[in-house]
Amino acid sequence: MALNGRPTSPTTLNGSISHPSQGEARTDVLSWDSYFMATAFLSAMRSKDPVTQVGAVIVNRQKRIVGIGYNGMPRGCPDDQMPWGKGHEDPCENKFMYVCHAEMNAILSKNAADVENCTIYVALFPCNECAKIIIQAGVREVVYYSDKRNDDPATRGSKRMLSQAGVQFRQFIPPESQIVIDFHVIDHDSRSLTPAQ
Ligand SMILES: O=c1ccn([C@H]2C[C@H](O)[C@@H](COP(=O)(O)O)O2)c(=O)[nH]1
């Protein structure tokens, strides 16, 4: 079964289809791209933004995660005391004045000396301000999921800068329609992640 060319069966923690016998390695595991993009979306689930939740994950050349973030208020600015709307005539009453973007948070949270030559996985194509930070940090590749703002000046400017700076960008096309973590089907008592049969 396929939907828009994609398989419809969800990828679950135990793998979706094959059940190799013991002694054989599982083969239908998540690809690296799916793994990191799913992690970016998991991070986005922490965002308090009521409209758009963005997650970002930075991965080095050894496939290690060296930074992760989501869009949110700056440290020390309480979420419940900051504005989350965007329709106020006073810019200081709109979220845009304050929210730190996911990409910036991922870069600033790095647990490595730097993020030179890393890849950043992002739920949404980075805006122009994030592109500046990505370029200046030495990130060499952007993998994005949504390009829904491709007509916005912020996205057009971003693509212009990334292209000029030699930062590659490509869209992630998910090979699976879902990645499911269903705690109810995970067998607590088993040493494998295979649900109880
Ligand atoms: O590259 C980006 C662009 C935007 N964000 C964040 C900033 C805001 O919290 C939302 C966008 O809000 P809208 O109400 O959808 O305009 O997304 C980001 O983290 N990275």
Image: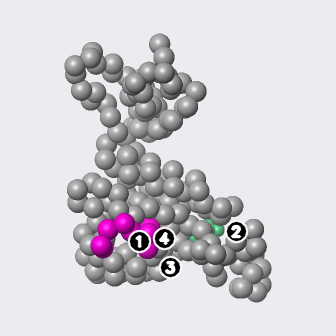
Residue 129 visible somewhere in the drawing: yes
Is the residue at mark 4 in contact range of ligand 1, meaning its CB lies under 8 Å from it? yes
> SS class of the residue under badge 3?
helix
Q: Which mark is residue 79?
A: 2
Q: Do the residues labelled 4 and 2 touch (CB within 8 Å)?
A: no
Tell whether position 113 is magenta. yes
What is the magenta segment's predominant secondary structure? loop
Give, as a three-letter code, the residue at label 4: Asn
- What residue is disc 4 on? 105
- What residue is disc 1 on? 107
- What residue is disc 3 on? 153
Q: In which quarter of the image is residue 29?
A: top left
Tell whether position 79 is magenta. no
Residues under labels 1 and 3: Cα distance?
Answer: 23 Å
Q: Earlier in the sequence, mark 2 or mark 3?
A: 2
Q: In this view, does 174 lie above or below 166?
A: above
Residue 172 vs residue 137, the one in the foreground: 137
Residues under labels 1 and 2: Cα distance?
Answer: 21 Å
- Considering every residue shown, the one lying at the far top of the view is 197
Q: Are marks 1 and 4 in contact (CB under 8 Å)?
A: yes
Give, as a three-letter code, the residue at label 3: Pro
Q: Which of marks 1 and 2 is nearer the N terminus?
A: 2
Question: Measured from the top left, where is residue 57 in percent x and y?
Answer: 41, 60
Q: Which residue is found at the position 29% from the left and 81% from the top?
A: 164
Give, as a three-letter code, the residue at label 2: Asp
